[in-house]
Amino acid sequence: MTKQIQQTLRDSKAARWAALIIVSFTMMWGYFLTDAMSPLMTMLEVEMHWSSSDFGIFNWAYCWFNVFLLMLIFGGMILDKLGVRITGVASCALMVIGAFIKYYAVEFISPEAGYIFGIRTQVMVASLGYAIFAVGTENCGITVTKVIAKWFKGKEMALAMGTQVAVARLGTALAMIVSPLIVKHFSMSAPLLFALVLIGIGLLAYCVFCVMDTKLDKQITAEQGDDDTFHIADLKEIITNKGFWLIALLCLMFYSAVFPFMKYATSLMENKYGMANEWAGWIPALIPMGNLIMTPLFGGIYDRKGKGATIMIIGSAMLIAVHVMFALPVLNYWWFAAFIAIVLGVAFSLVPSAMWPSVPKIIPEKLLGSAYALIFWVQNIGLGFVPLLIGWLLNEYCISGERVVDGQTFIQYDYTLPMCVFACFGIIALMLAFALKREDKRKGYGLEQPNIK
């Protein structure tokens, strides 16, 4: 008697990659708005009278609700309880709401409108919108990650996660390149309006994915039953797992040296390398642009060859070298900055391509939403507080004078100290990567083994 093999939608290569493209499209525009203000620090200083501290407070807002109100933790538990459809749509809706508030603050509130809790009203409202948006985009991020783990189980998971990261980084690259150009030809709020419209389209795209996922769930239930129910008590499997915490802390240190750096990278190009504002964003854009090719490439290598922990070690070591080169007072030319940015792009591809697909090797599938949420929560501590720290350092210790560009006077910053801070984060990340490799040998997680059997 021949045993009939039950096929599901995810067994179709075209279907699972179509699902990936849809959810990646949604995340790309979320990442665009996340960094839409990053290359505008100098323009905000001139047109809106924002100081580097104001800019730091605005970026700090990204963690207000996610970290202090534990919205990411709750989001992860809701994801494991209610699934990727309800959580994803709700997350996209929060992204739209936050994006609108952020746009409203910059477009309609005067920079001289007074203060709220000692913070400029315009900065405060924009920060509130950014904080709401952050709840949406971070929860959407963990939802999309679980979507990939679900749809690519036993398939090319690392390649899929690498591709999603690459597409999301395209949003970051576009923000770095396009935002200053849009501001120059339209207004300071125009990039935010552009992103708001695209995020709305991303929400509609995610609804299309929900139709596909509904069909997959019916097939999985018919084939396997529905016995993988999430229980709060199961969280003990996550919080008592040393390997999980090593990945979470590695994520914190590594991303603290990358994403906050991206917030100030355009200003670094202007102050250290003498680039004009409308072009300065092109150098930092090389970092996420490199992800388009390299992250899926390294993910494919991990799928077939393994060596996940080793890949994270190499990426962390490269991160240290990059920030040391940015800190050294040598070769202050745009082409050298471009070379360093490309190296950082390689490091930025190596670590995520191995880190995110390693979590399902340590944590059961039914707990992946909560596991990724906890990692994102830890990561958000760095994404919120490190920009605040860098803004404070620049304002207090790094003002070296003034510079005049096209008849306008700007504050001149020395970025040596901030780059040293970023390098220290890289050193800690490298130590954690080595510790993770040792733990993998001890527990046999399979981080050095291929994903495709």
Image (tube, rainbow, N blue to C red):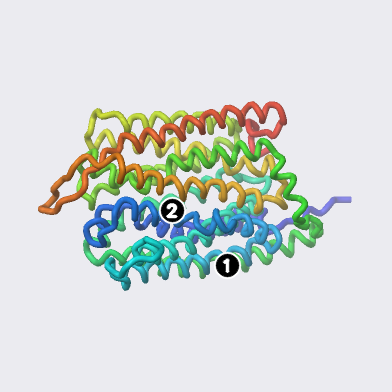
Quarter of the picture containing the C terminus is top right
Q: Name the mark nearer the viewer: 2 or 1.
A: 2
Query: What amino acid is labelled 2 in the image?
Result: Trp
What residue did someone put label 1 on? 89
Position of 127 relative to 323 (above/below): below
What residue did someone put label 2 on? 60
Q: Residue furthest front?
A: 118
Residue beneath the point at 43% across and 36% down = 346
- Residue 177 visible in the current orientation: yes
Residue beneath the point at 79% across and 62% down = 222
- Residue 22 visible in the current orientation: no
Residue 290 spot, x, y in % from top left: 40, 42
Badge 1 element = helix
Residue beneath the point at 46% across and 69% down = 200
Residue 232 spot, x, y in % from top left: 75, 55
N-terminal label among 2 and 1 = 2
Q: Residue furthest left?
A: 407
Residue beneath the point at 64% across and 26% down = 438
Q: Is residue 368 left or right of residue 409?
A: right
Mark 2 vs mark 1, CA separation in Å:
25 Å
Position of 271 relative to 180 (above/below): above
Query: What amino acid is labelled 1 in the image?
Result: Val
In depth, the one of 349 and 15 nearer the eye is 349
Q: Residue furthest right?
A: 1
In depth, the one of 23 and 47 nearer the eye is 47
